[in-house]
Amino acid sequence: MTASPKLLTLCLITQPPRILLGMKKRGFGAGRWNGFGGKVSPGETIEDAAKRELQEEAGIEAGPLTRRGIVEFRWQGKPDVLQVHVFHADSFTGDPVESEEMKPQWFAIEDIPYDEMWQDDRYWFPLFLAGKNFRGSFEFDEKDNVINHELHETAEDLSVAA
């Protein structure tokens, strides 16, 4: 029996030719560059959670958000499914500041540090950076290596996705 997915958000700010990433300082994913995000709280919309997490982790307020992707993550031998809703914003207010959880840093898009990120990012980032909508699923082994994945571009309007 599969557990119902845990809803999470991931928000990426791009201002070509650069992208804002954060170095995760503690907890799940510590030591990796990533977008900003986390769990959706009870009674909170997924978009509101994305905005809240960006504020908490980087000290900035997102401009209009666009949902670009929905990706499910599983780990071999574990029942949990993480359903991550990937959002994009190209504007924000405030200045990115380090929090207890994340250290924000701008990267040139051609210099994204994939070797210091989750392995799945190499698969879906190109679609994200090209402005495409996508859906996918990734399975990891116990060492966080991708062992199975499915990913496709979709014409679906993800702004209304659940």
Image (cartoon, grey):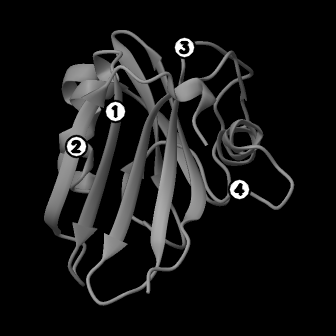
- Position of 34 relative to 16 (above/below): below
Query: 148 and 88: which one is in front?
Result: 148
Residue of label 4 = 40
**CA gap, disc 1 and disc 3:** 18 Å
Q: Please, what secondary structure does the residue beneath circle 4 have? A: loop
Which of the marked residues, 3 or 4, is nearer the chain's N terminus? Answer: 4
Q: Position of residue 82 (x, y in %)?
A: 48, 65
Residue toward you, 161 or 27 = 161
Is disc 1 surrounded by few (<14), some (14 to 19) or many (20+) residues within 10 Å? Answer: many
| Residue that extends furthest to the front in the rendered view of this protein | 1
Q: Return the x and y of residue 144 as percentages of the image width and height.
A: 25, 72
Q: Secondary structure at mark 2?
A: strand
**Residue wearing tag 1:** 134
Could you say which disc has been placed on residue 151 in the image?
2
CA–CA distance between discs 3 and 4? 22 Å
- Marks 4 and 2 close (CB-CB < 8 Å): no
Sequence-first tag of 4 and 2: 4
Q: Residue at x 54, y 73 (%)?
A: 27
The answer for how far apart the CA atoms under marks 4 and 2 are is 23 Å
Quadrant where the C terminus sits is top right
